[in-house]
């Protein structure tokens, strides 16, 4: 089951209008309680296409590549669209810090940061 703060490959096809399509890494935003009880989860897609333009296109790092978190594409998706978990959030940093890191899922070399501090285990 998806947990808040995890990274998942999500199949966003078929897109409608200006929606992002294809399979994309996405950050799970919905709460764990909602994820347990609902058939959908709320995600924010990551993309390599657009140039960073905060606050809607936030620069991040994913598997060593520069990508953007596409804030204006936040959406609820069916759990049926979730392919596999590619990382998990690990609380870190000093007290009072807003630092967050992601640990790659076992067997995965993928990791992502949403404008903060993240790492990938090799």
Image (spheres, rainbow, N blue to C red):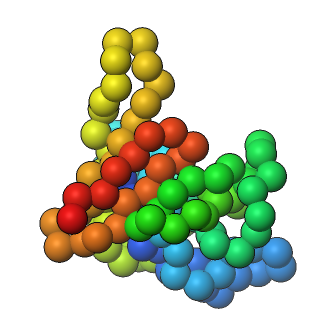
Q: Which residue lies furthest to the left in this view?
A: 106
Residue found at x 58% / y 78%: 12
* Position of the N terminus by quadrant: bottom left
Q: Position of residue 28 (x, y in %)?
A: 45, 53
Residue found at x 40% / y 36%: 100
Q: Which of 120 and 21 is in front in this view?
A: 120
Left or right: where 7 falls relative to 27: left
Left or right: where 106 falls relative to 75: left
Q: Position of residue 121 (x, y in %)?
A: 23, 58
Q: In this view, does 85 lie above or below 94?
A: below
Q: Quadrant of residue 14?
A: bottom right
Q: Where is residue 63 in the image (x, y as percent from the top left)?
A: 41, 67
Q: In this view, does 60 lie above or below 8?
A: above
Q: Which of 16 and 70 is in front in this view?
A: 70
Left or right: where 77 falls relative to 16: left
Q: Nearer the viewer, residue 4 or 32?
A: 4
Q: Position of residue 110 (x, y in %)?
A: 35, 67
Q: Residue furthest top?
A: 96
Residue 40 visible (yes or no): no
């Amino acid at each position: 089951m998806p947990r808040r703060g995890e990274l998942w490959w999500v199949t966003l096809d078929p897109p409608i209008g200006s929606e992002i399509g294809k399979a994309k890494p996405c950050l799970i935003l919905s709460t764990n309680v909602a994820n347990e009880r609902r058939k959908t989860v709320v995600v924010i897609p990551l993309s390599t296409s657009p140039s960073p333009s905060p606050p809607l296109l936030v620069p991040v790092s994913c598997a060593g590549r520069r990508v953007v978190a596409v804030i204006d594409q936040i959406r609820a998706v069916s759990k049926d669209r979730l392919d596999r978990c590619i990382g998990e959030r690990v609380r870190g940093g000093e007290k009072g810090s807003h630092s967050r890191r992601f640990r790659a899922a076992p067997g995965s070399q993928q990791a992502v940061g949403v404008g903060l501090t993240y790492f990938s285990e090799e």
